[in-house]
Image (tube, coloured by chain):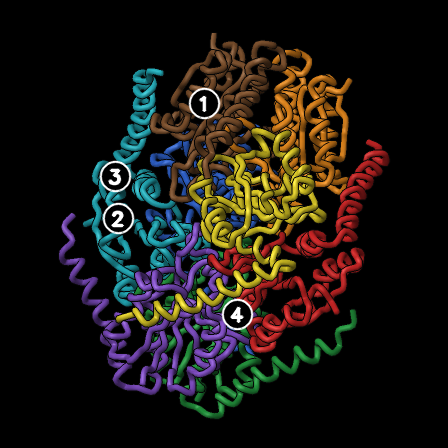
Chain colours: A green, B cyan, C blue, D brown, E purple, F orange, G yellow, H red
Amino acid sequence: MPLVGVIMGSDSDLAIMKETISQLKAFGITYEVKILSAHRVPDETARYAREAGKKGLKIIIAGAGAAAHLAGVVASHTILPVIGVPLEGSPLKGIDSLCSTVQMPAGVPVATMGIGKSGAKNAAILACEILALKDKKMEKKLISLKKEMVIKIKKKNKNLHI
Amino acid sequence: MPLVGVIMGSDSDLAIMKETISQLKAFGITYEVKILSAHRVPDETARYAREAGKKGLKIIIAGAGAAAHLAGVVASHTILPVIGVPLEGSPLKGIDSLCSTVQMPAGVPVATMGIGKSGAKNAAILACEILALKDKKMEKKLISLKKEMVIKIKKKNKNLHI
Amino acid sequence: MPLVGVIMGSDSDLAIMKETISQLKAFGITYEVKILSAHRVPDETARYAREAGKKGLKIIIAGAGAAAHLAGVVASHTILPVIGVPLEGSPLKGIDSLCSTVQMPAGVPVATMGIGKSGAKNAAILACEILALKDKKMEKKLISLKKEMVIKIKKKNKNLHI
Amino acid sequence: MPLVGVIMGSDSDLAIMKETISQLKAFGITYEVKILSAHRVPDETARYAREAGKKGLKIIIAGAGAAAHLAGVVASHTILPVIGVPLEGSPLKGIDSLCSTVQMPAGVPVATMGIGKSGAKNAAILACEILALKDKKMEKKLISLKKEMVIKIKKKNKNLHI
Amino acid sequence: MPLVGVIMGSDSDLAIMKETISQLKAFGITYEVKILSAHRVPDETARYAREAGKKGLKIIIAGAGAAAHLAGVVASHTILPVIGVPLEGSPLKGIDSLCSTVQMPAGVPVATMGIGKSGAKNAAILACEILALKDKKMEKKLISLKKEMVIKIKKKNKNLHI
Amino acid sequence: MPLVGVIMGSDSDLAIMKETISQLKAFGITYEVKILSAHRVPDETARYAREAGKKGLKIIIAGAGAAAHLAGVVASHTILPVIGVPLEGSPLKGIDSLCSTVQMPAGVPVATMGIGKSGAKNAAILACEILALKDKKMEKKLISLKKEMVIKIKKKNKNLHI
Amino acid sequence: MPLVGVIMGSDSDLAIMKETISQLKAFGITYEVKILSAHRVPDETARYAREAGKKGLKIIIAGAGAAAHLAGVVASHTILPVIGVPLEGSPLKGIDSLCSTVQMPAGVPVATMGIGKSGAKNAAILACEILALKDKKMEKKLISLKKEMVIKIKKKNKNLHI
Amino acid sequence: MPLVGVIMGSDSDLAIMKETISQLKAFGITYEVKILSAHRVPDETARYAREAGKKGLKIIIAGAGAAAHLAGVVASHTILPVIGVPLEGSPLKGIDSLCSTVQMPAGVPVATMGIGKSGAKNAAILACEILALKDKKMEKKLISLKKEMVIKIKKKNKNLHI
């Protein structure tokens, strides 16, 4: 049974959202991926959100662009933590999706990540941080990630020839 | 049976949305008013949108602030024209609600008005323009409105003492 | 006799506005296309707007970029519903055309769509929604469109191999 | 016969546009003031613009807020220099009126001033600079204005006790 | 032992951050409150973040304005979930704090809430959602919160006299 | 003796500012072109501005990007009309140069054009409008330009096959 | 002989710029204050900048609003470090002055501070940091300032009763 | 012993930050380059900042993109002047890094440069201006730089054939 649901408005969003997926894989977190749209398949989206908890999902990650309602709409139907990834899918370059995702009314939070690739990767890391609260294995993976970041930068500094 | 449904995210939005209501009244267009929220009462909102057409509503006007998903979510559940009024309900002064309302994905349009009072009034006028396509009485009201605007400005010019 | 007038500031705008045109075609809605500019041919534009209703047009769709006055100027001369499509024709990437199109003063609404391609397609769908209020055939087309969107996303989900 | 036409969208704009008027007065430039609106009285506005040159006007100054089409629409009907003053008449605080005024398409310029009071005053000064090209009296007034600014700042420096 | 650490850059931020605190109280979630600043007390802030997990904290909520580095800096020192609340503490009205909080580089997520009061309240609700993954009592509180929102809006609709 | 001085911050700006130059040529307006920079050659720039009037120049057109001070600095040293063209020379895509050019303090106006190519061309047309106030030949050129715009759009409409 | 020149566009800017002055006083750094304007007194401003170094000034702090050219213009005439403080003197709330101050072309840097009060105070601290490179007394003052910030926050934490 | 520390969030930032490095080289200012990240290696970054002064560094130049905390975090740990260069490392094109770098709270200044290449070069020039306060050789280099800029522009004017 997957722990994390990764949903997105269109299959074209996969180009960015695969950052989420590959990071979840790297952590060994089970997941499922669905194309869902607050606007094009509202009933399927609501149903997915309503049933997510019962199915055993712990966290939902939603990536969407433009008037990005997906994360907010999902959050309205569940008490699971919902992580929103604003995507650059319009001429406004993600300002619109950032505003639509983060500026939620009191009562219905969306844990918003940065626009695009970095945000997509961070969604998986935040999911891991949440799961790590009760899962020592996940805790270790996060500690390793932090250490790897230190090692990587050390290596980069060594290879720096200026 | 009302022709126009006027919905908004909170009763505090009435301060602005009464511009819509009083203009509908002035045109003699029947309407109903509901507090509905895409995030706080998603099922009621979806049901309202799905049943709107069968109940006889012709147009839905939705006012909302911040991550203003109301108009878009309603539009996802109906084939009635949905008019969105972005409200200034957050520190971002309506840029967030404008983006959230207007930047809809292909397939699900929202007829977006300007932010705040002017937009709220214009929502009623656009509703009237739509109804006027098949209602001569409404057509006359709109022609009168245009004439009154001319007369008002003429009067203002007469009273201008500089 | 066409029901919808599709106008735009320049023939270079056709690259985007053909989204409107092909969607109108798909719906079987008759239309005419004109290059008109609030700034370069103001008299022709005003005349077009004033005569639109008498000629039998029901809706005008106007696409324009930068200081996009076209939709607003047309709306000032007609009581037909005017749908505005802001285009990305300047370094400001459509923020300027969005503001110029949507922020209309009380009295003269423009039903504003999203910037660019999605907005152009949605203009045709909104036009169809308006016509569907009195045309069962159009109603069916819209219901089909909604269903197709559901089917497409289902198919995409089936083809998703991650 | 007035040399400068000062027009604005509403009498409420006078609060700011009187900066233009009092500066024109200070220069001894004849002027007339009119309430005109690109959207509410489009025919009067077009007529005013078309006849401005024949009547003897040399320059038109147009102040407007929100989707500020006034200056641009006037410029489309005249070959007189048109000076635009964007006003803060909406929640967007003048970004909308600045964009709508300045981002004109090639072929139809609007000499755009800053948003609000400073811009309104500067419109009169630019008008004076244009008239001074053929009017020595105006040239002297501008030289005096420059000198006064120097004197004022000297005085302020003297009175500075810190 | 508190489960949630609520930190903020200055005691003046309490005016907003008490929304977080009173919501945590309402849920019966234990918490501690600290004034900490990424810029003014960087060592204390780093120490707090590093020791948070060992002390038994499960989640850190950080509110800050302007160049709001607090949440990001804390996130760099812990693998606990960090929730960021951008505050309106500068002339830019929260755009600066939103950007500084949400646009984190890949590797170090901050779960960003909306600007100001709504965001502050939502931070507590997100914290509750995270804790509810392993705490049935919290789950019930969230279900109640959702129900109350429905009831409140129903009541508001009843009291609506227009 | 040239009537119009066209100045710009760098020779790389010529790519855009040649729109000004070729339009001036088309009108038969004499001009000179100089690379000048408010920041890199402030004394030459000030001297140029101070001597412009005496040399017989009637109008100065200044194109600059980023913190575009050129037009404002020139305007501080002359009573000639100064036309500013904001260029897209930085990651902010011209918002910075627009703000730096248009938001002048009361006392020192800059007639600001749109960002980039359209603005550069319009600068020449505004110059022509100013000169036409006392030059019938220029008046005719402007009337021709207006007519050509009408003819061009008519032709485009004829060639439109959709 | 003063070490720091504090200049600003208008005496009304003193309301904010006194933050700079009182911080300089607190550090015991000698200073002078002048009203200077890149646009209203360009020659005095240029002269001030050119002579600043010879007079013994080490640093110039310039506060200005709107199209804030003051710091940049001063920097063009001196090789002293110039610190710019963008002020909120227009409807755009300091975005315009920030862009005009910070986006300097390569060759002429302005050390830009935050908008308004915080920036004004920080300008004095940056000046102190620069002087401290060769002045042990200043170094001590800065170390004290850092310590005081720690003590203040500790005190605030003690007085926190929630 | 190097005088200037040039740090940046990632080796990919070198593409821009080499502008800083080559300008420092041209001035003959000694420097060191390090990859450091406020988020990925917070302890190394803090240590670097704390020890910078003791090691003999006089100035730190920090380049970072997105939620660019690097300069601010370094400034929190040192009393050396810190120069921040906002980089275009995200879909928001540097607005986010500009806000995160410049909007520092009172007490901890960052001398912020323009976004990208120009800012990177200017960081080195500002560093030189600071060092020149006590180093006549640096003073001469800056005077030469100013002269070269004048000569370059003169040459460009000579080669201008239009």
Mark 1 = which residue? D20
Q: Is residue A94 above or below residue C47?
A: below
Percent x, y of residue E10: 38, 64
In the drawing, what numbered circle is on residue B23? 3
What's the CA distance linking mark 3 and mark 2?
Answer: 12 Å
Q: Is residue G150 left or right of residue G45?
A: left
- Give the mark toward the camera: 4 or 2: 4
Label 1: element kind: helix
Residue contact between numbered discs 1 and 3, judged by CB atoms under 8 Å: no
Q: Are marks 4 and 2 on the same chain?
A: no
Q: Is residue C148 above or below residue B92?
A: below
Q: Residues within 10 Å of mark 1 (few under 14, many from 20)?
A: many
Q: Residues within 10 Å of mark 3 (few under 14, many from 20)?
A: some
Percent x, y of residue G63: 53, 43
Percent x, y of residue C73: 46, 32
Quarter of the image where the N terminus of chain G is located: top right
Mark 4 = which residue? A119
Q: Are marks 3 and 4 on the same chain?
A: no
Amino acid at circle 2:
Val
Q: Nearer the viewer, residue G82 or B86?
A: G82
Residue C45 shows up from this direction = no
The residue sitting at 64% across, 46% down in the picture is G104
Mark 2 = which residue? B4
- Give the mark toward the camera: 1 or 2: 1
Given the image, what chain letter belongs to the residue carrying mark 4?
A
Residue contact between numbered discs 3 and 2, judged by CB atoms under 8 Å: no
- Give the mark toward the camera: 1 or 3: 1
Residue D30 shows up from this direction = yes
Given the image, what chain letter belongs to the residue carrying mark 2?
B
Q: Is residue B81 left or right of residue F1?
A: left
Q: Residues within 10 Å of mark 4 (few under 14, many from 20)?
A: many
Given the image, what chain letter belongs to the residue carrying mark 1?
D
